[in-house]
Image (cartoon, coloured by chain):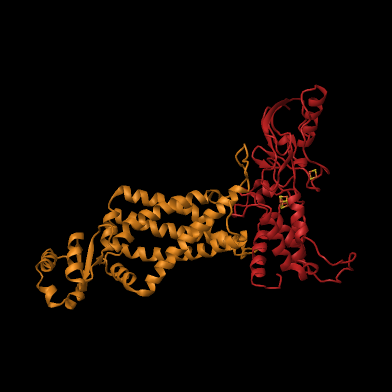
Chain colours: A red, B orange
């Protein structure tokens, strides 16, 4: 397959970026998007055309959350429920023009080319996305009773890999889906209950402080999340925020 | 820009609370409008307007309503500004994520709705306040309250004479109708006890006899349709009342609510225009 790529190139956070156009040929349809970029980089290096294009990646199997590119107007490209590393070139047509941009948000400054700094997510987690007491090893089955539907919801929320596609997709660069997921997977479980209200407060305050936007219930995040985290987690976050405002110390 | 600090979710909670108040108000407003469809020479509608124009609870409610609309606008504009600041550099490619169309257009439908509300105020509220000329009516029973001086006033009796002469008395005998702005001014000044009030039944029916007004009205409700489609489920989501089980029910209720409002309101100009 053959493609025309328009890729965002930016030397560093302060430099002015621009789109650079590259042609690439002989790409297998079974190639992943990142493998296609690898081939482009090889070409750029071998033919002394330019510095290789920088992009984040690690596991290349959709579990680490490192990769993330805004491809033709969609975070992680035109497939549902996958990360960029799981996106295959068969989802494009031969001869397509592909626009590749980094995540754009005030809270995610660009480091270089397509690599953005997602430390903001770490800061939100550091603000309260943990349980401060050691919870020990894996408890015996049925030692701590958790209703099945609660366990399922907590597990679904815990699937969030912190990739930032929700922020990238949101027209307001809001991190509510991420924070909703992180709050939910802890607050739903007994181990998370004691600090639940505190956690909501601290994480939301941190999110605001870091310059993420406010949710306007557009649900672009839900549509683009590779782990298909649902809007109900945002509703839970709102609910627990209200609870926290009134000093309620109970969890759902 | 340094805006005062209120947490993002708290701000949104206010928008949702204020919005839900407006959703309820729309239902009430729609029900009242449907009275116009009765061919009763405005009996129900005029009585209703009289109640709304004179009751002090309604007067307080009016102020609350204006405050609520202002707060809704203020908060959403504030949110829109902070949201805009959250992405200083925009994407080159327009978003292709699958979302409800209404949600992305909220700000723009909101602006258009605000403009239409201003026109609505010009047409009705300002007539009521007396800034804009309209058509007026007087309660027949108020005539017995007139003092001797007013009764002998020639200008006042001219007005009343014309009304009786032309048979401008409502079918139920409660109202003297079709009093114009100049006559109203005479009555207000020389016989204040007659207490002329706007004749909204005929003002509205007159307005809806013009095709361009009817079309404008329908366009407005098309815009409102998109706004409400998003607004209704959004209130539940923001107030934290959404969950896996309720979500489909809330979405369905939102559609039902929006259709009821839009059909209820638009039925009035369409049926009046068609003379039904
Ligand atoms: S909620 Fe989804 S899109 Fe957002 S960071 Fe987590 S996995 Fe990525
Ligand atoms: S590289 Fe790990 S999720 Fe894509």
Which quarter of the rendering shows the C terminus of chain B?
bottom left
Rendered residue at 46%/51% (across/down): B111
Residue A77 in the image: above or below residue B14: above
Say which quarter of the image contains residue B156: bottom left
Q: How many marks?
A: 0
Furthest residue in direction top, as rendered = A47
Query: Can residue A69 be seen in the rendering of this structure?
Result: yes
Residue A74 in the image: above or below residue A157: above
Residue A209 in the image: above or below residue B151: above
The quarter of the rendering in which ligand 2 is drawn is: top right
Say which quarter of the image contains residue A48: top right
Q: In the picture provided, is B240 more to the left or to the right than A195?
A: left
Residue A188 or A88: which is nearer the viewer?
Answer: A188
x and y percent of residue A105 in the render? 66, 46
Q: In the picture provided, is B272 more to the left or to the right than B177?
A: right
x and y percent of residue A165 in the render? 70, 47
Query: Can residue B249 be seen in the rendering of this structure?
Result: no
x and y percent of residue A93 in the render? 68, 31
x and y percent of residue B60 in the render? 40, 71
Say which quarter of the image contains residue A232: bottom right
Rendered residue at 68%/73% (across/down): A248
């Amino acid at each position: 397959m053959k493609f025309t790529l328009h890729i965002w190139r930016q030397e560093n956070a302060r430099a002015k970026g621009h789109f650079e156009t590259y042609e690439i040929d002989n790409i297998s349809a079974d190639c992943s998007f990142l493998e296609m970029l690898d081939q482009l980089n090889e070409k750029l290096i071998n033919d002394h055309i330019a510095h290789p294009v920088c992009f984040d990646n690690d596991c290349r199997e959709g579990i680490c959350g490192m990769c993330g590119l805004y491809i033709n107007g969609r975070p992680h490209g035109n497939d549902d429920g996958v990360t960029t590393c799981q996106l295959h070139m068969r989802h494009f047509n031969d001869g397509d023009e592909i626009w590749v941009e980094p995540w754009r948000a005030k809270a995610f400054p660009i480091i270089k080319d397509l690599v953005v700094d997602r430390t903001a997510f770490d800061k939100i987690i550091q603000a309260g996305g943990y349980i401060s007491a050691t919870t020990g090893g894996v408890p015996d089955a049925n030692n701590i009773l958790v209703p099945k539907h609660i366990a399922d919801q907590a597990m679904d929320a815990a699937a969030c890999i912190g990739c930032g596609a929700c922020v990238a997709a949101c027209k307001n660069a809001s991190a509510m889906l991420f924070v909703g997921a992180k709050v939910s997977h802890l607050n739903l479980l007994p181990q998370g209950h004691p600090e639940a209200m505190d956690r909501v407060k601290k994480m939301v305050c941190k999110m605001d402080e870091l310059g993420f936007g406010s949710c306007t219930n557009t649900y672009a995040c839900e549509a683009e999340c590779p782990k298909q985290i649902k809007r109900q987690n945002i509703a839970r976050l709102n609910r627990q925020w209200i609870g926290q405002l009134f000093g309620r110390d109970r969890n759902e | 820009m340094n805006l005062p600090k209120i947490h993002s979710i708290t701000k949104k909670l206010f928008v949702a609370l204020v919005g839900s108040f407006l959703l309820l108000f729309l239902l009430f407003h729609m029900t009242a409008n449907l009275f116009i469809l009765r061919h009763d020479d405005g009996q129900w509608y005029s009585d209703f307007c009289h109640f709304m124009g004179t009751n002090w609870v309604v007067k307080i409610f009016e102020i609350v309503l204006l405050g609520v609309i202002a707060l809704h606008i203020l908060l959403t504009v504030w949110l829109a500004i902070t949201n805009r600041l959250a992405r200083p550099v925009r994407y080159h490619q327009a978003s292709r994520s699958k979302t409800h169309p209404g949600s992305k257009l909220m700000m723009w439908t909101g602006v258009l709705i605000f403009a239409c509300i201003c026109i609505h105020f010009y047409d009705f509220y300002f007539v009521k306040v007396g800034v804009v000329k309209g058509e007026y009516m007087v309660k027949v029973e108020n005539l017995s309250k007139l003092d001797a001086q007013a009764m002998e006033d020639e200008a006042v009796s001219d007005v009343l004479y014309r009304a009786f002469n032309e048979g401008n008395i409502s079918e139920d005998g409660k109202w003297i109708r079709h009093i114009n702005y100049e006559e109203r001014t005479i009555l207000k000044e020389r016989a204040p006890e007659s207490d002329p009030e706007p004749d909204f039944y005929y003002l509205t029916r007159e307005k809806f006899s013009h095709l361009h007004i009817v079309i404008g009205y329908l366009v407005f409700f098309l815009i409102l349709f998109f706004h409400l489609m998003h607004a209704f489920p959004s209130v539940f989501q923001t107030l934290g009342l959404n969950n896996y089980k309720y979500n489909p029910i809330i979405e369905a209720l939102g559609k039902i609510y929006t259709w009821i409002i839009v059909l209820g309101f638009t039925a009035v100009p369409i049926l009046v225009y068609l003379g039904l």
